Amino acid sequence: MLDALNRRLELVRRVQAHKQETGQPTIDAKREADLLKELQASNRGPLSERAVEAVFTAVLDVMKRETQAPRRDTPAAPAPAAIERLAVVGTGLVGASVALAAKRSGVPSVRSWDADPANPAADATSLEAAVADAELVVVAVPVSALVSAVRSALAATSGVVTDVGSTKRAVAAVDDSRFVPGHPLAGGSTGGPARASADLFDGATWFLTPLPSTDDAAIALVERFVTSLGAHPARLEAAEHDRLLAFTSHLPHALANLLMRAVGGAGENALGYAGASLREMTRVAGANAAVWADIFVENGDLIADALAAHGSELEEVERALRDGDRAFFERWIAEAAAARDRMLGYAYRTEAKMLNRIRVRIPDTPGVLARITQTLGAAGINIEDFELRHVSPEYGGVLVILIAGADNAELARTLLRREGYSAA
């Protein structure tokens, strides 16, 4: 069987090379479906039609993945680590993840300290012991304690110091040429070192808000380090960072809490009959209270400004609702759609009109998502994003997949329908 599969793979590779040279599509879903029908028709048992289909699609998917996998005769040499000695102050989700990511990138010495002596991710007995000989110190404490912790780290080391705080104006008061304020757009609604991961920052934007007095060499060192963790450094002024985050992160959290409290106050029926749209809009409601209370206090003025602007528009919406102003709502919705399209274009690095939504009903059974992603992955179709909406145990749920390109989307629909799924 192994000999037959290996011979089959060599044939598949030659066929694929020929298709690429002649400009033909590499996946022919109709031919695959026809071959499956022929195979099932020639089956004499005892394998069932379903079993034949499972074997056929499994072999097909393996062949597709093998032809797409790059051949490497020798492993690539690892890139040199950005620094030799790192210290992390504060080992919650983000701090512990920084330590893990640094070890993954090859940093030889990573030491960490936490104010909680019971924190299992910390290995130093004091802040001073952790940072003394560090080239770089990453301060990852709550924003209410950030200024004090940064000053303590600067006093205890001759190295460069950065932080990961969600607000930046307060820490800008720390005027030291070795300090490079920062903020990675990564984390989660629940934290703690147990949830830390070395890949938390892969592909993430990592803001740096250097001060006028910050040394250029210190900025360059932090940028190299951030890049070595898999993130993309981006420079902003502290005030602009806090203004942008007030709208793009802090306001959504405030509104999600407001909405969830309103629905909760409407009674148990409101909660019991809540639809998928409410669950999606309130996903971040109730996020880590200690962390978010600090953020609302530290960036309170700008969040209040964002809420005030939002409130002014709500007055217009209320007026239009009472007046039955259809023209207002058509314009209002169209403007929101255009803004969302621009946002998606930035998020997926492609024009919004190239993004195609595919709606798939899925049963509430194990292995369904794996089968769908395997089917599309084997055909080289990238899922840009997806939403999973659970309806009920009886109905199952709805999977909405975002695919770039009309041809890819049509092929995805064909392949999913071949597997027995609806794909609208």
Image: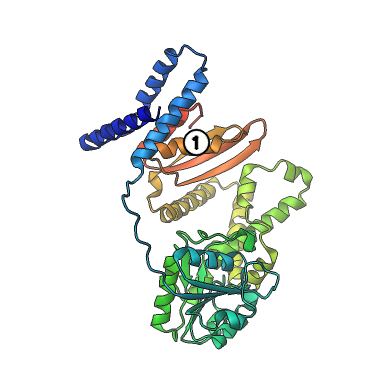
Residue 199 appears in the rendering: yes
Using the rendered view, name the quadrant where residue 290 is placed.
Answer: bottom right
* Direction from residue 360 to residue 59 in the image, left or right: left
Q: Secondary structure at mark 1?
A: helix
Image x and y of residue 324, in percent: 60, 46
As drawn, the residue found furthest toward the left would be 22
Residue 229 appears in the rendering: no
Of residues 216 and 314, the one nearer the viewer is 216
The answer to whether residue 388 is above or below residue 285 is above
* Direction from residue 91 to residue 102 in the image, left or right: left
* Direction from residue 194 to residue 241 in the image, left or right: left
Image x and y of residue 401, in percent: 49, 41
Callout 1 amino acid = Ile
The answer to whether residue 286 is above or below residue 132 is above
Assess disc 1: are there few (<14), some (14-19) or many (≥20) residues with their C-alpha within 10 Å of its C-alpha: some
Image x and y of residue 367, in percent: 57, 35
Query: What colour-coding does the image apply?
Result: rainbow
Q: Quadrant of the N terminus?
A: top left
For image coordinates 35% across by 61% down, the residue present is: 77
The answer to whether residue 397 is above or below residue 161 is above
For image coordinates 47% across by 61% down, the residue present is: 204
Of residues 4 and 52, the one nearer the viewer is 4
Using the rendered view, name the quadrant where residue 261 is placed.
Answer: bottom right
For mark 1, what is the residue? 372
For image coordinates 35% across by 32% down, the residue present is: 6
Q: How many callouts does the rendering have?
A: 1
